[in-house]
Image: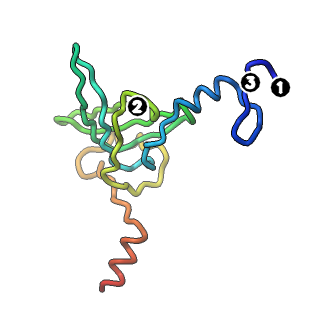
Amino acid sequence: MYVGQTKDEDGSPMNTLDALDAQSLRSDIPDFRPGDTLKVHVRVIEGNRERNQVFQGAVIRRQGDGIRETFTVRKVSFGVGVERTFPVHSPNIAKIEVHMRGDVRRAKLYYLRKLRGKAAKIKERRSSSAAKASTSAS
């Protein structure tokens, strides 16, 4: 074992940077993927005040792994497309809420940038438990 390495929980050697990264990972991140609509509550510091700002939009990309993982959220504000990229494990994110699950067939939704109006709408993904409940009710 090299100097500066620690042991993982299963006893395998772990790099010091990997151990530091593992401590910084957040456990309160919900499961989401591209196509989902999120409400991202971001901590904003203005002078000596701190407040939360909500950025709601569709996830068009999720990339990276571990502490370096990021996701990009796109919304249309006053007719102008706005995209914002957040680190998943950032301490500046107060919380992430999944507003709606989207049904898409791509991992990167860059094609939404060219679409306008109803064409840019993402179809809602229906969960299997909700589908079973609606068929048994009829």
Tell me which amino acid carries mark 2: Phe
Residues at marks 3 and 1 touching, judged by CB atoms closer than 8 Å: yes
Image quadrant in which the C terminus is located: bottom left
Upstream in sequence: badge 3 or badge 2: 3
Element type at mark 2: strand
Of 3 and 42, the residue lying toward us: 3
Tell me which amino acid carries mark 1: Met
The image shows residue 15 at horizontal and vertical percentages of: 71, 26
| Residue density around tag 2, few if under 14, some if 14–19, many if 20 or more, within 10 Å | some
Rendered image: mark on residue 1: 1
The image shows residue 59 at horizontal and vertical percentages of: 38, 43
Residue where numbered disc 2 is placed: 86
Q: Residue at x 40, y 36 (%)?
A: 72
Q: Is residue 62 left or right of residue 51?
A: right
Residue where numbered disc 3 is placed: 5
Image quadrant in which the N terminus is located: top right
Q: Work out whether 35 lies above or below 114.
A: below
Q: Work out whether 135 lies above or below 107.
A: below
Element type at mark 1: loop
Upstream in sequence: badge 2 or badge 1: 1
Residues at marks 3 and 2 touching, judged by CB atoms closer than 8 Å: no
Q: How far apart, in angstroms, are the residues tagged by discs 2 and 1?
A: 36 Å
Residue 113 is drawn in which quadrant?
Answer: top left
Q: Nearer the viewer, mark 3 or mark 2?
A: 3
Q: Residue at x 64, y 23 (%)?
A: 17
Of 34 and 51, the residue lying toward us: 51
